Amino acid sequence: MTVMPAPDEAAKNTRTATKAKSGGRPVDPEDTGPIMRRVKNRLTSRWATAAAVIIAVIWTIPTFGLLVSSVRPAAKQVGPRSDGWWNFFSDWDFTFKNYVDVTAAAGSQSANLSQYFVNSLAIVVPVTVFVLVLASMAAYIFAWGNFRGREAGFIFVFALQIIPLQMALIPLLQLFTQVLQIPPGSYTQLWIAHTIFGLPLGIFLLHNFISEIPGEVIEAAKVDGAGHTTIFWRIILPLSVPALASLAIFQFLWVWNDLLVALVFSGGTADVAPITQRLAEISGTRGNRDYLNPAAAFVSIIVPLAVFFGLQRYFVRGLMAGGLKG
Amino acid sequence: MEFIGGKLLQVVIALAIFAAIIGLLMLLVDRAPKSAKDKVTVIGFLAPAAILLLVGLVYPAAQTSFLAFTDSGGKLNGVDNFVWMFTQPEALATLRNTVIWTILVPLLSTVFGLAYAVFIDKARGEKVLKALVFMPMAISFVGAGIIWKLVYDYRGPGIEQTGVLNALRVALGLDPKQFLLDAPGNTIFLIIVMVWIQTGFAMVILSAAIKGVPAEIVEAARLDGANPWQQFRNVTIPGIRGSLVVVLTTITIATLKVFDIVRTMTAGNYDTSVVANEMYTQAFRAGEPGRGAALALILFILVLPIVIYNARVLRQQKEIR
């Protein structure tokens, strides 16, 4: 939760790096001198490596099995001639048809997965924008505003994180359908629900970061005649990009991978339901299209995996920061 | 692909409305008379989030606490829902499973994560090894459910097995097993899925903590004649205590709320339900919002002390630094 780097901490890091270069004494553990390297080498144990590799292989086999299954023809996956995915390496029977069927099969009785894929995107992108903007506005006022009850208000928002979202589901659904009469078949309920559930953590994280911005920067802008809006959009937001990026990634993944909120608020039609909901549906029913499940699952995890491998650094930060969310 | 147009339009309209609201707020704040400027600023920046949180989280939480004491018709029925929870066999099984989950998942994930963090600390190719075990963390619980259904796949004896585990059993001369059907073992097999996901989280945080333990202290312990196990037990473990607490509590909270894995793999059948899944089933499938609310309240009460403890530890760490 406290893993987000403070702005001055980043500056400190660059400072130590330059010091190490000019002073010649290594400070950074990565930049080890000859003695340290020898120690590290001696500690490098063959047994530790072997154990680590074994665990890594065990951890990867399930996902790998899914990937291999997804490119095997239907007859090899279900029915009398089916066998385990590892036989792929003896028969080399490869097909891309599952992916085509699952994403583009037009005219089949069930809507194809690309609809749900688009739904996921259509849900996740606006929610991420809403949470980032609203949370940073609130965080800025909690950090630099001047009003009574500022501390108490922030502590209250912080405390909201402990409410499991299960506590909100039943009344919120009643509110949406009976009081506000939001029509089913649109994304509106999901957008609002996800935004609400993302706000407490978002405000908390961004407050940690924004409150560390040096006060002189803001004072200088005020002297130059800038109002709160100018300071917020022109100074605070650009300076907060690292924190915003971490929060954005976390929020994106959380909404993309969510099932519970979708089940309650989407209504389950191809017009609105995200890919996770569709996936849970097709994996829960046995049918003659079971052989498509691995390909479908892989389509849904491809986005988070891309985020994971592409932005691992921010991803780790976001996850650590979001440990308490849910 | 004609469906994309309508969906894109919805998204664009939503973003435009949002931008208009925010723009209007900013305009109001900017144009406010000098005398009231501070007040208008605070209200303008805070109001959207405050309204959403009050209407969407605070009020529903209060309402749920009230619902927990009502029956399916919405009439007050005292503590009947809680009596149901603690006396009916199927509800008791749900509570028992939740207890098993919250004990085993944090413990196993942390032990595996810590062991793995220690191993790779001294191994070559650390980055790749780390990424492989951390990867499940990016996969949705639903995706993980499908992945593991494939691992647990069952075919009758005498037929080619398609699941890895049953193929191994057959190769060892055992009968294939219905991993997800036979209670109480099936809960353990669901727990393995969660451990598979959370180990990566534990590993990444503990690995960072281990690297934070000063090398000089470990070296000094070595020179004093401590063997590797003693170095680990008496130097490394005390050095990463804070991180261990954070990892354990964070995983415990995530486990208490686990829903998707159970929903995808067994839907709570065959005696595998947990509180979060039963809450959904009762409230949205069985037409018993009172019982669902009572289960949500129990969840809240279980999470509360852990979060408070976690916040305490974090604050102490901050003060030490």
Image (cartoon, rainbow, N blue to C red):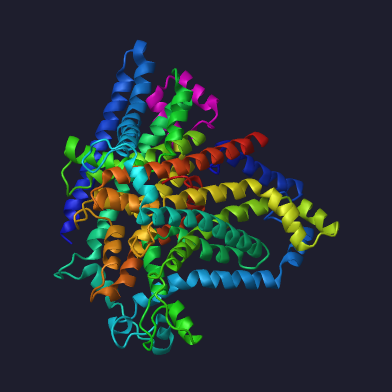
Image location of residue A40, percent across then percent down:
74, 62
Task: Report the front residue among B92 and A189.
Answer: B92
Residue A143 in sight in this render:
yes
Residue for point 27% across, 35% down: B76
Relative vertical location of residue A302 with respect to residue A47 in this rendering, above or below: above
Magenta part of the protein: which range? A210-237
In the figure, residue A105 lies in which quadrant?
A: bottom left
Which residue is found at the position 29% from the left and 53% from the top? Answer: B281
Q: Position of residue A117 (x, y in %)?
A: 27, 59
In this rendering, the answer to whether A155 lies above or below B107 is above
Above or below for B294 versus B233: above
Residue at the spot 40% in from the left edge and 64% down from the top edge: B144
Farthest residue, direction right: B224
Q: In this view, does A36 lie above or below A171?
A: below
- Quadrant of the rendered structure where residue B155 is? bottom left
Which secondary structure is most common in the magenta stretch?
helix
Asked whether residue A302 appears in the rendered view, the answer is: no
Query: On the image, which quarter does residue B46 sit in?
Result: top left
- Is residue B201 a member of the stretch shown in magenta? no
Left or right relative to A186: residue B104 = right
Q: How many marks can you see?
A: 0
Q: In this view, does B97 lie to the left or right of A39?
A: left
Which residue in the rendered view is the most extreme toward the top? B35
Residue A125 position within the rendered picture, expressed as x and y whole percent measured from the top left: 31, 48
A259 or B71, nearer to the observer: B71
Q: Is residue A266 left or right of residue B26?
A: left
How far across and how far down the image is residue B271, in percent?
Answer: 38, 62
